[in-house]
Image (spheres, grey):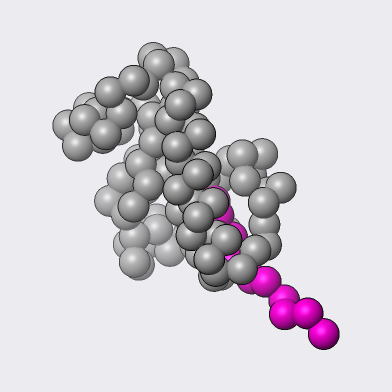
Amino acid sequence: MAPRFHYSVYVIELSSDVMYEARFRKANPDYVSGKPCVYVGMTGINVDQRFDKHKAGIQSNRFVREFGLRLLPKLYEMYNPMPYEGAREMEVELAIGLRESGYGVWQA
């Protein structure tokens, strides 16, 4: 029987106020005004639970904790689930693709 993949990539919309953060701005020199700001991550747990953990301050990214609004499943659902290595690579590729499309992106 084939192993059941349980890793996922996910994208969280961030409030546009995150652009007031110097580190976020510096990471997004080609940000197109008006495009969404997002956090791209990967997890081995349910993405809704992962979002809740971020917001609760458990293994969380500060930008998600302070500026996270909602998950954006249209940007990631088609990739999930996948093996660990696939998720690690897809997290980076997805972040690069969104940044190239003008999004403000934080990917840890």
Q: Tell me what residue is drawn at x 67 percent, y 71 percent.
A: 5
The residue stretch that appears in magenta: 1-10
Provide the major secondary structure of the magenta segment: loop
Up-down relation of residue 73 to residue 30 (above or below): below
Image coordinates of residue 24 in percent, x first then y, are 26, 35
| Residue 56, picture quadrant | bottom left
Image coordinates of residue 79 in percent, x first then y, are 67, 51
Q: Tell me what residue is drawn at x 34 percent, y 52 percent.
A: 108
Image coordinates of residue 53 in percent, x first then y, are 43, 64
Up-down relation of residue 45 to residue 94 (above or below): below
| Residue 29, picture quadrant | top left
Residue extending furthest toward the left: 22
Q: Is residue 5 visible?
A: yes
31 vs 47, left or right, is left
Q: Tell me what residue is drawn at x 17 percent, y 32 percent.
A: 22
Up-down relation of residue 25 to residue 46 (above or below): above
